[in-house]
Image: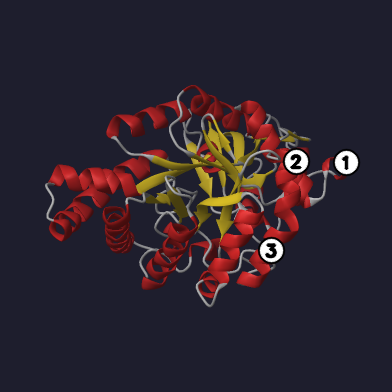
Amino acid sequence: MQLSNGHLTYCTNIHPGEDWPSHFLALQQNFPGIKAQVSPSQAMGIGLRLSNVAAVELEQGDNIAQLKQWLTDHDAYVFTMNGFPYGEFHNTVVKDQVHAPDWTTDLRVNYTLRMFRTLAQLLPVGMDGGISTSPLSYRHWFTTESDLLKAANTATDNIAKVAEELIKIYRETGVVLHLDIEPEPDGILETGNEFIQWYEEFLLPRALTRVSRTFDLRASEAEQLIKQHITLCYDVCHFAIGYEPHQRVIDELEAKGIKVGKIQISAALKADLPEGAGTRQSIKESFERFDEPTYLHQVVAKITGGNVIRYADLPEALADIENPLVKQWRAHFHVPIFTEDYGPVQSTQSDIVEVLKIQKNKPFTNHMEAETYTWTVLPDEKKLPIGDSIARELNWVKEQL
């Protein structure tokens, strides 16, 4: 739905199913009830997640025409899409494979361009559209600095190809589409600083040459177009895990003219670790209950002196629970955002409140998307049917805004 400070929706990656019939059925079963609770009197947006299989199938036959008619019939629209997970996202072990195929491959390029073709057909007139995506690749796949640099260069060149295609669409149609790069723990880009450094030292130099030559533009004109079409996905969970100063990051992006394509409104888990042998057992047990085998649950630990230790997955952190240097854990879980209390551990809900306050006072993006997909962590007394749970999340966000 459109609020005074942007469009708000939820990401449909919460719904299982990997082919287009399954995706569409999930929308048909869940969206009308959610809309009735959240936006009964005005049109409501959808943050559409498509696997590659579903994206291919949606382009076939009259599927897009059927979807467009369904959107019209239900007073709905699509303005943002999640193009991060290429394949199965439920009922399998995802872990680091959420990055595969990564931006070093043509498969990732073709998947992303396919989704942009679909988004261009679904997007309402006069609205910009965005697709969030992987932060180039998973850094632990590369064992040397030279391999990591080579991957970053190849991925950047492929993203520049996408920028060129989006600029072509803009010059032909006037429609603004943007690729929203999503920093994530253990991605090649995992922090705001790394994203900004990559943008200025990798993307702009490599994309400027390509765009200037293709469209016969001055460097300043090409840079403006690149910054219009390659943007940041500000996932609050990911930035909170890294203890990032939200206002400072957002201010620096603005100062450099780098746009935020979307806020993903999401929460991690955190806990202060008390001093003393044996005092951390209840916190360890709580995190063990949250651990599940589907997704990576990276942990960033703040230690004495303000530095951090990064653990690639929760079991590694659990094995180091008694480290006396560690003062706090933050763990990668997209837990429900409406509550902060999870017993001995808490969520990073306060980071969401801070970011939404910045957005409320001085909007820095048009797109906001709640992204919760680990509902099982809720105690039984707080659990609701999935549609009611999503509506509760969105109504909580509306209250903050």
Three-letter code for the amino acid on which mark 2 is drawn: Gln
Answer with left or right where residue 33 lies relative to residue 366: right
Quadrant in which the N terminus appears: top right
For the residues labelled 2 and 3, say whether their Cβ atoms are less than 8 Å apart.
no
- Which residue is rendered at x = 68% and y = 38% of the image? 41
Question: Which secondary structure, mark 2?
Answer: helix
For the residues labelled 1 and 2, say whether their Cβ atoms are less than 8 Å apart.
no
Three-letter code for the amino acid on which mark 1 is drawn: Glu
Answer with left or right where residue 144 lies relative to residue 340: left
Residue 370: tell me if it is visible: no
Query: Could you give the CA–CA distance between mark 3 and mark 1, rounded to whole angstroms?
Result: 24 Å
Q: Which residue is mark 3?
A: 16
Query: Could you give the CA–CA distance between mark 2 and mark 3, rounded to whole angstroms?
Result: 22 Å
**Residue 68: x and y, percent?**
56, 61
Mark closer to the chain start, 3 or 1: 3
Mark closer to the chain start, 2 or 3: 3
**Residue 22: x and y, percent?**
67, 69
Q: Is residue 101 above or below residue 266?
A: below
Residue 95: tell me if it is visible: yes
- Which residue is rendered at x = 71% and y = 57% of the image? 292
Q: Which residue is mark 1?
A: 381
Query: Could you give the CA–CA distance between mark 1 and mark 2, rounded to whole angstroms?
Result: 20 Å
Q: Nearer the viewer, mark 1 or mark 2?
A: 2
**Residue 314: x and y, percent?**
63, 51
Q: Nearer the viewer, residue 132 or 307?
A: 132
> In the image as oriented, which residue stretches furthest toward the bottom?
61
Q: Which residue is mark 2?
A: 37
Quadrant in which the C terminus appears: top right
Q: Is residue 32 above or below residue 361?
A: below
Residue 321 lies in quadrant = top right
